[in-house]
Amino acid sequence: MEIHASENGPYLIDTNGRVRLGDETKELRRLALCRCGASENKPTCDGSHKKIGFEAPEVTITID
């Protein structure tokens, strides 16, 4: 599994299509998780990183 942190943006996780967030199940090809702390929809990203000028490097995390 890989988790990709986009430059100045969220953590991106490619899924198999079904994601369960709390009591809700969604069909998503990619899940974007907040890493700036400003999202109103935590743990998912709502684009707030752009508004607050969040800066962080791009990185890929590989889990074996």
Image (cartoon, rainbow, N blue to C red):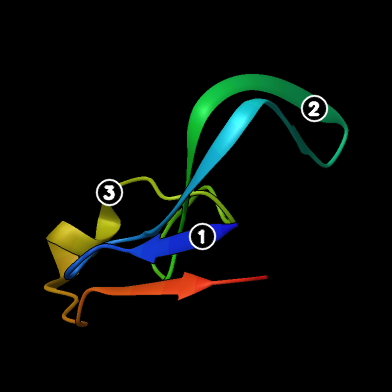
Instruction: Say which residue appears at 42% left-offset and 71% top-offset.
Output: 35
Is 34 displayed left or right of 43 in the figure?
A: left
**Residue at the spot 77% in from the left edge and 24% down from the top edge:** 25
User: Sequence order check: which comes first, mark 1 or mark 3?
Assistant: 1
Q: Which residue is mark 3?
A: 47
Say which element carries label 1.
strand
Label 2 sits on residue: 24
- Residue 59's mark? none
Please identify the residue farthest to the right as the structure is shown: 23
**Residue 37 vertical position relative to residue 21 in the rendered view, above or below:** below
The answer for how far apart the CA atoms under marks 2 and 1 are is 23 Å
Residue 7 against residue 28 in the figure, above or below? below
Sequence-wise first label, 2 or 1:
1
Q: Position of residue 52 (x, y in %)?
A: 17, 70
Callout 2: helix, strand or loop?
strand
Residue lying at the far bottom in this picture: please name it. 56
Q: How many marks?
A: 3
Residue at the disc numbered 1: 2
Identify whether 61 is placed above or below 10: below
Question: Which residue corresponds to the image point at 64% horizontal and 28% vertical from the top-left?
Answer: 16
What is the residue that sits farthest to the top in this orientation?
27
For label 3, the SS is loop
For the residue carrying disc 2, how many other residues have a C-alpha within 10 Å: few (<14), some (14-19), or many (20+)? few
